[in-house]
Image (spheres, rainbow, N blue to C red):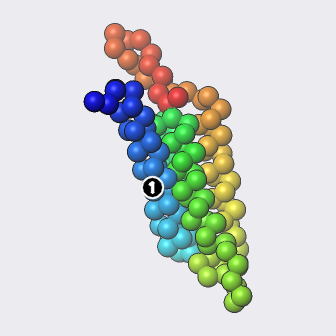
Amino acid sequence: MTSSRARGRSRLALAWVAAAVLGAVLAVAGLAVHRHVDAGIPWGLVLALAAAFFATRAAGMLGGRAAAVALAAGYGAVLALTMSSRPEGDYLVAADALGYSFLLGAIAVLGIAVVLSVSGARHTSPGPAGHPRTLGS
């Protein structure tokens, strides 16, 4: 029989893996939409960076600091694959203003979101009997 502590650890590890997979999926989606420009506004880039920020913050609030770091690591792993050198040039991300904005913007946004999660910024919600309950860890 497994102890409740071991079950809790396995659930936590599963949550971290799920966060990393979500980060990778978000990065692939960001790669797909970051070049969409309409009326001179890079809506795809804005959407990709906003999704990365809010998903990382949500992971930090729901799963703690480690979940935010895991999501950012999954996203970063996909970005690292896109930046691999090829003899003919960039493959997934074009070497232009939109491409570099996506890569550098994603790194900055993920970094800010993780720092906000790790810095101890807490969010409170009313708990039982009106006592504040801290979300995130």
- Residue at horizontal 52 percent and vertical 29 percent from the top: 137
Q: Which residue is mark 1?
A: 22
Q: How many marks?
A: 1
Quadrant for the N terminus, please: top left
- Residue at horizontal 54 percent and vertical 71 percent from the top: 31
Relative to 17, residue 128 above or below:
above
**Viewer-closest of 59 and 124:** 59
User: Picture coordinates of residue 18 (x, y %)?
Assistant: 42, 50
Type of amino acid at the residue the image marks with label 1: Leu
User: Picture coordinates of residue 107 (x, y %)?
Assistant: 66, 57
Could you tell me if residue 51 is visible in this image?
Answer: no
Could you tell me if residue 87 is visible in this image?
Answer: yes
Q: Is residue 100 left or right of residue 77?
A: right
- Residue at horizontal 39 percent and vertical 27 percent from the top: 5
Q: Is residue 6 left or right of residue 64?
A: left
- Residue at horizontal 71 percent and vertical 88 percent from the top: 87
Q: Is residue 27 left or right of residue 120?
A: left
